Image: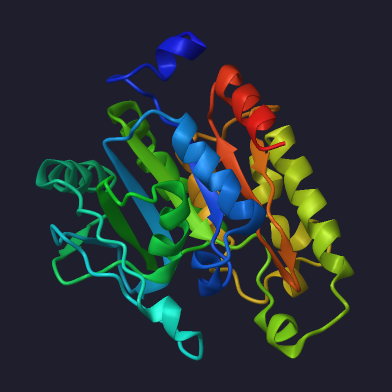
Amino acid sequence: MSDSASLSSGSAVFPSLFISHGSPMFALEPGQAGAALRTLGQTLPRPRAVLVLSPHWMTRNLQAGSHPAPSTIHDFGGFPEALYQLQYPAPGAPKELLDHLVGMLAAHQVPLQLEPEAGLDHGVWVPLMHLYPEADVPVLHLSFPSHLTPEKADALGRMLASLREQGVFIIGSGSLTHNLRDFFGGSDDTGYVAAFVQWMTDTLEQGDTAALIDYRARAPSAERSHPTDEHLLPLMFAWGAAEGDGPGQSLRLPGEQIGSLQMDSYLFGAPEALRKALGEAIR
């Protein structure tokens, strides 16, 4: 399939995306990361829906929001009042997509519970405000199973990879680094962040799935960059959804470093023409 045909209107094979959603203040302070997401949303064809996995909706087993108009959840405290006034009134996923998702996962012996009362947590709506600011793309919010591991996150993404051929944009929302103790403590000792980010970028560029899954043993300052796994596992999910991508096919979307939080995102499985166009646009 050619680059142009693979992203043609009506038959788009979408890439997958890992987003660093950072602090909820990302909604009001888009910076470089928000600008990169805005450019991406303007460059891609319109998806049938976006499917987003976020660690801020953690459940025992896998669930998906099924409300036709999911609410905007302000699942945080201590921020400026303007943040609590923001709404992201995107429609929910169409029933036929939800039913198809249930069937896909059942084929892998993975039960999926539909949750009609689920809204959109800030790991979903905050970055989508920049990616699709008109809130006009249906959102399928996938929960974060509490038993998820790097291997299982990668496997879950692979189970859902064929949705990309049906116009669904698969997104894992987390954070490239996520040491909140350093962040809220105002630590100036954040040099470890750059080393971890460089290792991650190199590993993705090399298409090394085994190293990615084993990042805790192989990446420099892995435990300090991620005292717990949950904000990096969406990257493994997005990587798996691109079926492992491959050497030289990842695109890093740069974002600011805010203390111990690095706001870079990564696009996987995009054709060369799209990677080139985006690389030039966000330079």
Count numbered badges in the picture: 0
> In the image, is 113 to the left or to the right of 242?
left
Q: Nearer the viewer, residue 15 or 108?
A: 15
Answer yes or no: is residue 4 visible: yes
Q: Residue at x 52, y 62 (%)?
A: 149
| Position of residue 182 measured from the top left corner of the image (x, y, whole percent) | 75, 82
Q: Residue furthest top?
A: 2
Q: Nearer the viewer, residue 65 or 215?
A: 65
| Position of residue 89 measured from the top left corner of the image (x, y, whole percent) | 25, 60
Q: Quadrant of the N terminus?
A: top left
Q: Residue at x 51, y 85 (%)?
A: 79
| Position of residue 16 measured from the top left corner of the image (x, y, whole percent) | 47, 39
Q: Quadrant of the C terminus?
A: top right
| Residue 207 in which image quadrant | top right
Q: Nearer the viewer, residue 200 or 102?
A: 200
> In the image, is 150 to the left or to the right of 5?
right
Q: What sort of colour scheme is used for the picture? A: rainbow
Q: Is residue 56 above or below residue 93?
A: below
| Residue 272 in which image quadrant | top right
Q: Is residue 206 above or below residue 110?
A: above
| Position of residue 154 measured from the top left corner of the image (x, y, whole percent) | 50, 48
